[in-house]
Amino acid sequence: MVHHNYSPDLVQTQRDWTRTYQALAHARTDHTVLRRRLIGLSRRLVQDVPRTEQADLRRRAQEPS
């Protein structure tokens, strides 16, 4: 599969989004902090990555560095 050339900070943002989402799914407290962080990360991803490329970015973020 050919990946688009995403900047390293954008790939890191996707990784942070995934980790935050997982933390929120398992959290028993601090939901508000995690939700706010997820919203901020989501906003960045939506603004910087076209919808048609979001799945590709998620796959790229899952690859080993």
Image (tube, grey):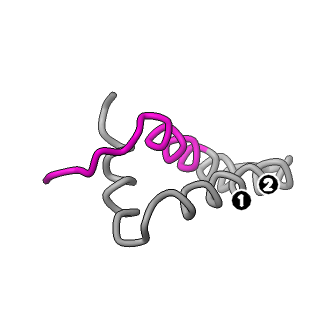
Q: Residue furthest top?
A: 65
Residue at 35%, 71% in the rendered image: 52
Prevailing SS of the magenta stretch: helix
Q: Check the image and report above or below for 55 versus 17.
A: below
Pick the front one: 11 or 26 = 11
Residue at 15%, 52% in the rendered image: 2
Residue on which the image places disc 2: 36
Element class at badge 2: helix
Placement of the C terminus among the 4 image quadrants? top left
**The quadrant where residue 25 appears:** bottom right
Verify whether residue 10 appears in magenta: yes
Q: Is residue 23 left or right of residue 58?
A: right
Residue 45 place in picture, x, y as percent: 54, 57
Verify whether residue 54 appears in magenta: no
Residue kind at label 2, given as amino acid type = Arg
What segment is highlighted magenta in the picture?
A: 1-19
Q: Residues within 10 Å of mark 1 (few under 14, many from 20)?
A: few
Residue kind at label 1, given as amino acid type = Ile
Residue at 29%, 45% in the rendered image: 5
Residue 11 place in picture, x, y as percent: 44, 41
Residue at 85%, 47% in the rendered image: 30
Residue on which the image places disc 1: 39
Q: Are marks 2 and 1 in contact (CB under 8 Å)?
A: yes
Identify the disc placed on residue 1.
none
Q: Is residue 12 left or right of residue 26?
A: left
Pick the front one: 12 or 26 = 12
Residue 10 place in picture, x, y as percent: 48, 43
Element class at badge 1: helix
